[in-house]
Image (tube, helix red, strand yellow):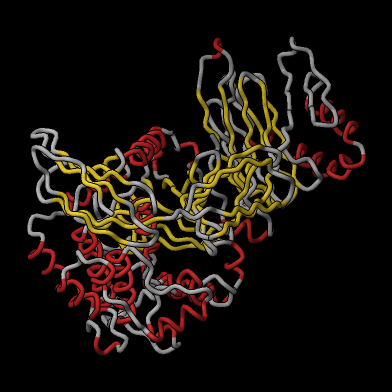
Amino acid sequence: MNYEVFGKYVLLEKLAMGGMAEVWLSRSIGSSGVGKFVAVKRILSQFSEQPEFIEMFREEANIAINLQHANIVTINEFGEEKAQFYIVMDLVNGRNLKQILNKVKTSNVALSIEHIVYICKEIAAGLDYAHRCIDPKTAKPLNIIHRDMSPHNVMISFEGEVKVVDFGIAKAETQVEATRAGTLKGKFGYMSPEQADAQQVDQRTDIFSLGIIMWELLANDRLFVGKNEIEILRKIKDCNIQPLRKLNATVPPELEKIVAKSLAKDRNLRYRNADDFHRDLHKFLNVKYPDFSKADFAKFLKNLFSKEIEDVSRKLLDYAKTDFSQYVSVSPTASSAAADKTTVSTSVTSTQHTNLKDGPAATESLDVQSNGKVNIIEARNDKVEAKNLRMDGAVANVANSYSSSRSATANVGGTRSISPYGTNAAYGGTYNGTYNGTRSKASNSYGQPSSGYGGLVVILLVLGVLIGGGVFYVNDPKQFNNVISKFLGSGSNMSTTQDSRPTSPTDPNRTELTSTTPERISQVAITSDPSGAEVLIDDQPKGEITPTTIKLPEGKKVKLTLRAPGYLEHSQEFSVQPNRMSVRAAMSRIRVGYLEVAIMGAGQLTINGESVQAQNGRITVPADTKLVVLVLDPVTKSGDEVHLQVAENASRRVTLIPRQSFKPRVLP
């Protein structure tokens, strides 16, 4: 499988895609192929062309890279590659808080109060560290404010670790997104009143945003919602917050007071800093739930995501076993590339040596160009195959395999490089008008010394023919192939899509150059009503939410699945049309009610025969549907059973008391 090389990282698969950036599961490549898994956040190229954004992003990334805390995702590197800015972050093996909430709702379980308090306590600890962080260069406070605290920016590992993402970067992204209509709608719901009123913000803005997150987790509902941005901003400015205990009676009064203080409209009445917020949450957790530990939360997550954890572990294991050493290479000097104003090309070759009696060595050459095009050339048993070959007069990759494993690769046009490889030694360099490279006498496959100057002359002749023949090829491709074939030898054959004449199978020096048509990709715009649905293609999550645009192979028949909390899963099949197409789906809402179950004793809780987590909490159930709520101790056979219905959007409380002998009770 071929992977994109991005600087010193191999991009394995896309984890997420947003309006401004994409996040890739990546592996860093070091000496002897040693590396580790990281997350590479790559800013989309169109934003790298905006000078204001570039300067702001650099400034904020320079600040964020100083943050080293257990509750903050560490940024290890910031740079630019292929005209795209990127940051490299620690990989968190888990999900963001928004994804966890979606999973909780679709699994008909609930986050317990101790889980919620623990999550928010850890977020507050990360905020406090960032707010107090000192610039190591000046010993002065950095005055960092996240500005975009929301469930999307909280990562939680399957081991129960809670980490805040994108410190500092949020300011740069928000400034740019503010100029794009509609892009901030999802973020508006977590703004503070002073943000909504365009006032100067300080660290207490992050406290208010964290208070919104905590309120929503406890209420199992959104706090500030509206038909449009203006209505949402008006509600935030008014800051009329419904008491939590009216929505969830299981919330202790002292916890309701903590949340209310964090959500005070007047910032002077809020917590002065995140440390005070953290202290109150920590004290509440220790007093109310003294036996709770992070391990309890991790156990909950592992049960909830058992299948996903198994899939991720298997995938990472497969990647860990993959030999990425072939991607390690030495790039030509930047000064040479700049002087000639050509694209720098790096040729990477891995050779498996064999005895001559067993046949020539198998060689695979990966030609990675900085313009993003990847050309693969494979030579096995004197047969050369060129994939993604372009022979349009602008760029040509020519591979010639001799009777041994020696091969020559030449890129003519925007990219020019020379990289002949021998069985025992290599002779290579980059040609930029004048030859800038090392010259050494290398032994050929027959053990005879070869002249560096002689090899250079041959190579320059090849380049001259190719450069001169670029236009010639366009006018008469068949005649061009004949000329090149005679130049390389009567036994050689150059085949393209225009001329595919076979050579004799007995010719030991034949060279086949095949051209494969690259897969055509089409852009598919996917929208849904409502928006915010998770996108799956052929039952595989794409890490995208609607509205979004994804790339799919043209002509392929795919199955699209959309999932959104509170709505029935939507599936449809379609064939990908050329260029760009749109797919819109109307999702059917699930009519639901809420059930609060209190169990006076021990036992396994089931609803309509399906096991749910036995805890005092709010459970989402189908509305206006007969429900059989049963608690049963499998050892003592004690239980209690209740039959009832819950109206749409209504909440009912049920108390179950397990007994040895019990009869079903029907509630009106």
Q: Which residue is nearer to you in this view: 625 or 21? A: 625
Q: Which residue is nearer to you in this view: 13 or 302? A: 302
Q: Residue at x 33, y 60 (%)?
A: 73
Q: Is residue 395 left or right of residue 163?
A: right
Task: Residue 21 in the image: state x and y as whole percent.
Answer: 52, 61
Q: Residue at x 38, y 62 (%)?
A: 649
Task: Residue 135 in the image: state x and y as whole percent.
Answer: 30, 77
Q: Residue at x 21, y 52 (%)?
A: 297
Q: Is residue 380 left or right of residue 56?
A: right
| Residue 375 seen in render | yes
Q: Is residue 20 left or right of residue 260?
A: right
Task: Residue 144 in the image: state x and y as whole percent.
Answer: 33, 77
- Total tally of numbered discs in the picture: 0
Residue 547, image quadrant: bottom right
Q: Which residue is nearer to you in this view: 370 or 227? A: 227
| Residue 32 seen in render | no
Q: Is residue 353 above or below residue 125?
A: above
Q: Residue at x 39, y 86 (%)?
A: 238
Q: Is residue 412 above or below residue 496?
A: below
Q: Is residue 660 above or below residue 86?
A: above
Task: Residue 91 in the image: state x and y as whole percent.
Answer: 36, 52
User: Where's the C terminus, which quadrant?
Assistant: bottom left
